[in-house]
Amino acid sequence: MKSFIFTLLLMISTGSVFAAAPVAKIQSMLAKPAIMCGRFDQSKQLNGMKKPLLSNGRFCVVAAKGVLWRTLQPFPNSLRLTHNEIVHFQGERVAMRLDAKQEPTVRMINSVLFSLLSGDLAQLDTLFEVEGNIEANSWHVALKAREPALAKAIGAITLDGGAYVKNISIAEASGDRTNIVFSAIQTGESAILAEEAALF
C-alpha cells in the first residue's frame, strides 16, 4: 500500500514541475495554476497477467491544500493528500488515515509531493537521477530513483507533456508497468467540483 501511495503521489503531482536536464526551460513551459483538475485513464499491466487492469477518474491539485485522486471506474474511491496526512475515502467514509507524525513514510512521501508542487528541484534531485529533452512545445523526462529502497518501490518513471503533463509511465522493479494519460484539464475555481472541494 505504501509503495502504491508513493507511486500515486508521483503520478498526480504533475501540475507544477518535474526536473529535467533543461530545468529552467521545462519549468517555463509548465503551467502552474493554483487549482487544476482533469481526467485520468490508467492502465496497469501486472507481471504474469495477460490483460491490463483499467481504471479512470478525476484528479485535482490545489496548491495551498494538497491533492485529490478520485477513481470512478471500476470501483469508486478517493485519496486526499495534504502536508500532514494521507486519507483514503470509500464514499464519504474514511477507510484509512496515515498521519505524518506517526508514520515516517508519509512524511517522506509528502515531502516529495510538496517539493514537486513548490518547484523545489534541489529536494527532487537528491532522490532522483534526471534526464530530459525538449522538442518544440513538448518535453520528455525520465526519473530514476537514487536510493535502492526507493528504486525497489518505484522503479523508473517517464513523463511527457507540454503546458501540462500528458502521459506518465512507471516501470516497477517487480516487472509491473503502469501508464496514465491525463486529459480534459481545467484550471481555476470552476475546475473543482463541489463534492471535491468538500473533501479538502
Image (cartoon, rainbow, N blue to C red):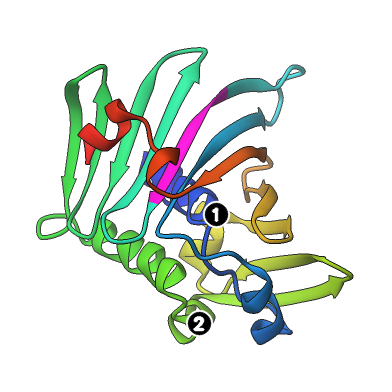
Question: Measured along the vertical axis of the image, is residue 127 above or below residue 79?
Answer: below
Label 2 element class: helix
Residue 144 drawn in magenta: no
Residue 108: x %, y % from top left = 31, 65
Quarter of the image containing the N terminus?
A: top left
| Residue 137: quadrant of the picture | bottom right
Nearer the observer: mark 2 or 1; the answer is 2
Q: Amino acid at mark 2?
A: Leu
Above or below, 71 relative to 149: above
Q: Dot 1 corresponds to which residue?
A: 154
Which residue is at the front of the view, 160 or 51?
Answer: 160
Residue at the (56%, 62%) spot, across then down: 151
Residues shaded magenta: 56-61
Amino acid at circle 1: Ile
> As displayed, is residue 175 above or below residue 173?
above
> Does 181 sit left or right of 87 as displayed?
right
Residue sticking out furthest to the top: 74
For the point 59% across and 69% down, the residue is 18
Q: Position of residue 166 (x, y in %)?
A: 70, 49
> Does the magenta portion include 60?
yes
- The chief SS type of the magenta part is strand
- Dot 2, how many residues are within 10 Å of its Cα: few (below 14), some (14-19), or many (20+)? some
Q: Nearer the viewer, residue 27 or 3?
A: 27
Residue farthest to the left, as pictured: 101
Could you say where residue 119 lies in the image, as x and y percent from the top left? 47, 76
Classify mark 1: residues with Cα within 10 Å, few (<14), some (14-19) or many (20+).
many
Q: Which mark is residue 121?
A: 2
Q: Position of residue 124 (x, y in %)?
A: 49, 77
Q: Quadrant of the C terminus?
A: top left
